[in-house]
Amino acid sequence: MYGEGQAIGGRSMKSMTGQLLVATPALKDPNFDRTVVLLVAHEAGGALGVVLNRATEVPVSDVLGEWGALARDPAVLFEGGPVQPESAICLARMRNPVERVKGFHLISGAVGTVDLSVDPERLRERISGIRVFAGYSGWSPGQLEAEISGGSWFVLDALPGDAFVDRPDDLWPMVLRRQGGIMAAVAHFPPDVSLN
């Protein structure tokens, strides 16, 4: 990962890995309307994230068997984004984030990705829950930065529980409200009003 002062997208920029992208009302792409995306990676080669608030009705256990027992409610697959919907990315929250665990890659704080080829029993005592995403959201070098500059996304700090909320449909307004001020007012923006 790139830290502050290193080149991302051709200019000096701090990596946004672990931060939330919250769709602004100006973003009208149906793939991202009122979404909250956790950035799993942000490097010179582009960015990758998963949409946290698009639950499906497919139980994790129907697709990944024993992993379903570790899934947080709702224990269903989530639509991570429009890229490679047949692939899966699994987020987990570690009970002890300083412990090194094979098959777990830290993103930020106690949250990271889990290798789904690992035996879920090996992780049962070490994680407090998982969430599985079908597909992901991806940006080529400089694309995300251009979208942010164009007013499509708010870049906000994530809380450890954001990826695992019990009511994912409420995440977009919840994240905006906790910012306070004008940002909290955006949470009440009507979904059917055009800004164009």
Image (tube, rainbow, N blue to C red):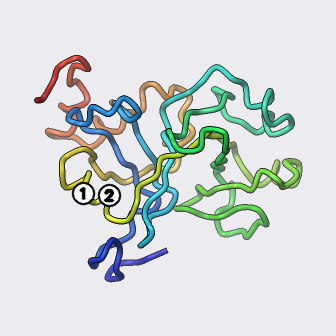
Q: Image check: 50 left or right of 77?
A: left
- Where residue 101 appears, as percent x and y from the top left, is 76, 66
At 63% from the left and 26% from the top, the residue drawn is 74
User: Residue farthest to the bottom?
Assistant: 5
Q: Quadrant of residue 14?
A: bottom left
CB atoms of marks 1 and 2 within 8 Å: yes
At 63% from the left and 49% from the top, the residue drawn is 91
Q: CA distance from mark 1 to mark 2?
A: 5 Å
- Where residue 32 appears, as percent x and y from the top left, is 38, 35
Q: Which of 137 and 111 lies nearest the eye of the viewer? A: 137
Secondary structure of the residue carrying tag 2 is helix
- Where residue 146 appears, as percent x and y from the top left, is 24, 57
- Where residue 94 appears, as percent x and y from the top left, is 67, 55
Q: Is residue 129 above or below residue 16?
A: above
Residue type indicated by callout 1: Ala
Q: Quadrant of residue 194?
A: top left
Check the picture and name the quadrant holding the C terminus: top left
Identify the residue under disc 1: 146
Identify the residue under disc 2: 143
Q: Residues within 10 Å of mark 2 (few under 14, many from 20)?
A: some
Secondary structure of the residue carrying tag 1 is helix
Q: Is residue 166 above or below residue 145?
A: above
Q: Residues within 10 Å of mark 1 (few under 14, many from 20)?
A: few
At 14% from the left and 38% from the top, the residue drawn is 182
Residue type indicated by callout 2: Gln
